[in-house]
Amino acid sequence: MQYMQYMWYALVLVVGTLIGYLLRRVIGEAKIGSAEAEAQRILDQAKKTAETKHREIVLEARDNAQKLRAEVERESRERRLELQRFERRLINKEEALDRRQESLSRKEDALARQERAISQKERELEELREAAIKELERISGLSRESAREMILQEVQETLKAETARMIRDAEDRARAEAEQKARSIIALAIQRCAADHVAENTVSVVELPNDEMKGRIIGREGRNIRTLETLTGIELIIDDTPEAVILSGFDPIRREVARLALERLVADGRIHPARIEEMVEKAQKDVESIIKQEGEQAALRLSIHGLHPELIKLLGRLRFRTSYGQNVLKHSMEVAQLAAIMASEIGADVNLAKRAGLLHDIGKAVDHEVEGSHVAIGVNLLKRYRESQGVIKAVEAHHGDVEPQTVEAFLVAAADAISAARPGARRETLEMYLKRLEKLEEIANSFEGVEKAYAIQAGREIRIMVKPERIDDLGAVTLVRDIVNKIEKELEYPGQIKVTVIRETRAVGYAK
């Protein structure tokens, strides 16, 4: 039963579906027919509307085209008028330029004519000038170059005279002021650095307890004295002087070694070659120690630091060196103090002046071993041990061998002169000193053409004035060499002597 119901429901459903399909098809065809009619109507209406719009657009386009054509024609007329105006302006400017160019051409022609006229006049003037110069040369008897040289010479002479007068006035004022100031400074330095010095000779004396000791010093067949002289290089003079032996030698260090060794041998009493050798060796070590201590003490007292150890030793050697009876180490310390005092007074470098003053005679420590003057030897030593250029220049110039280049160099030279020249500093027989200077001047005056000769710098330099009409420049060079050779042959002197030949021609006039 239920199966039948299901079949019935299915049949109803199929029939309903079929009927619905047929109804929908019929309704759809009817709607399609009405839609087509409506579409055709709408299409016809659209065609009519389009035709109307087309006619309106065409009319509007024609109106716009007419307006645009009118506007373009108006702008064209305006542009054409503007171009015509611009063309007229250009034509006017071209005409103005043509007129200006024509005017300039006329002016150029006028200027050219003026230039030709001026050139002609210049040639005429030059001819007149040349004629006038020739006439002046004929009248004066001088050429153009001679007249020019004469005028220039007169101007130069006038300027030279004026300049010389101004320089002389300035030098006189400066010299007066400087001399007054220098005197004050030097007096102050001398006052603050007054010291006593002990004079020493080139001989040493050893006292003996008795005259019998002389025989023991000589020894059997002179063995002891020969040994001592060989080891020390010092000559022992044993004469009639009671209870004394004289040690003679140029080297002060060796003389001191010999003195210490002999004093110890005399005190010990055992004098034989082996003992002499032992005592000489000990004395050498002691003297070396003394030398080092003296150098260190000198640098310490002056507050000079940074000296090379070899320079310290050389300073100590100056303790045993004398110059004209003046102890060189004490002289060097005095020069350092004087230079430092003067440097402080004038605002110069105090340390540099003090250092240069202490080392200025360092060459005397080895001048008996090395050839040359103590100045040249000292400069070489300072260069070797890398001292500053300021110190080297001051040492090099302290005797006037070269021109001083620094203030400190002048101060060291002045301090050296002060220390050597003060009363009691040096001792030399006045008669011997004068004879040496006279001999020096006599040698110079013995040559032909010499007008005057002056020994200066305590005999370390001689200046010779020659007659310019007798001795020319080349002759002056030859004369210097001849004088030097004669001095070396005939004169005995310490160090070196500078020979300067001066040849000059003077023209003097007086304005009245």
Image (tube, rainbow, N blue to C red):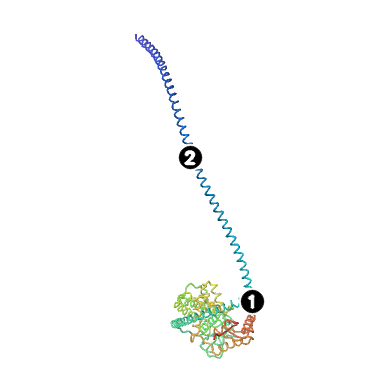
- Identify the residue at horizontal 57%, vertical 56% (top origin): 102
Q: Which mark is residue 200?
A: none
Residue highlighted by disc 2: 74
Please tell me which residue lies in front, 224 or 17.
17
Q: Give residue 511's position: percent from left, percent from top.
A: 55, 85
Using the image as rendered, state which of residue 333 and residue 165 is in the foreground.
165
Check disc 1 and report its element: helix, strand or loop: helix
In 3D space, how far apart are the residues under numbered discs 1 and 2 (Cα atoms)?
A: 90 Å
- Mark 2 closeness class: few <14, some 14–19, many ≥20 residues within 10 Å: few
Give the left or right position of residue 6, taking residue 68 as reference.
left
Query: Where does residue 488 sit, x and y in percent of width and height?
Result: 62, 83
Of the image marks 1 and 2, the number of the one nearer the N terminus: 2
Query: Does the rendering let one see residue 45?
Result: yes
Q: Quadrant of the C terminus?
A: bottom right
Q: Residue at x 44, y 27 (%)?
A: 53
Mark 1 or 2, closer to the camera: 2
Q: From the image, tell me which residue sits under label 1.
A: 135
Using the rendered image of the protein, determine whether residue 501 is visible from the camera's viewpoint: no
Q: Amino acid at mark 2?
A: Arg
Q: Does 81 appear above or below 295?
A: above
